[in-house]
Amino acid sequence: MTVESSLDAPVCSAKRCTAVAVWALRWNNPKIHESGRRKTWVACDAHREHLAEFLGSRDFLCAVEPLEDGSDQAES
């Protein structure tokens, strides 16, 4: 079961998901981003592993952290 997002809560970055995000997936594409730059996807519990595997298989994943205050916004 997923929790539908509210207007203020970040929404999961998974395609067609409308659940509230509770995880921040920090990533970097070394071919196009500076080494210190971190982009962020946010994920619900149901999609955290899938999104992490997608980024990890490309060697983009840097960290998976709990989304603490909801202030993180997904960056594509």
Image (cartoon, rainbow, N blue to C red):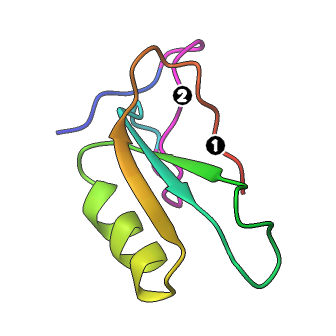
The residue that appears at 64% across and 33% down in the rendered structure is 73
Q: Which residue is mark 1?
A: 74
Q: Which residue is mark 2?
A: 10
Tell me the SS state at disc 2. loop
Number of numbered discs visible in the structure rendering: 2
Pointer 1: residues within 10 angstroms few (<14), some, or many (20+)?
Answer: some
Q: Which residues are magenta?
A: 6-17
- Residue 36 seen in the current view: yes
The residue that appears at 47% across and 68% down in the rendered structure is 61
Q: Is residue 33 left or right of residue 70?
A: right
Pointer 2: residues within 10 angstroms few (<14), some, or many (20+)?
Answer: many
- Residue 47 seen in the current view: no
Magenta region includes residue 24: no
The residue that appears at 63% across and 43% down in the rendered structure is 74
Q: Is residue 39 left or right of residue 67?
A: right
First reached walking from the N terminus: tag 2 or tag 1: 2
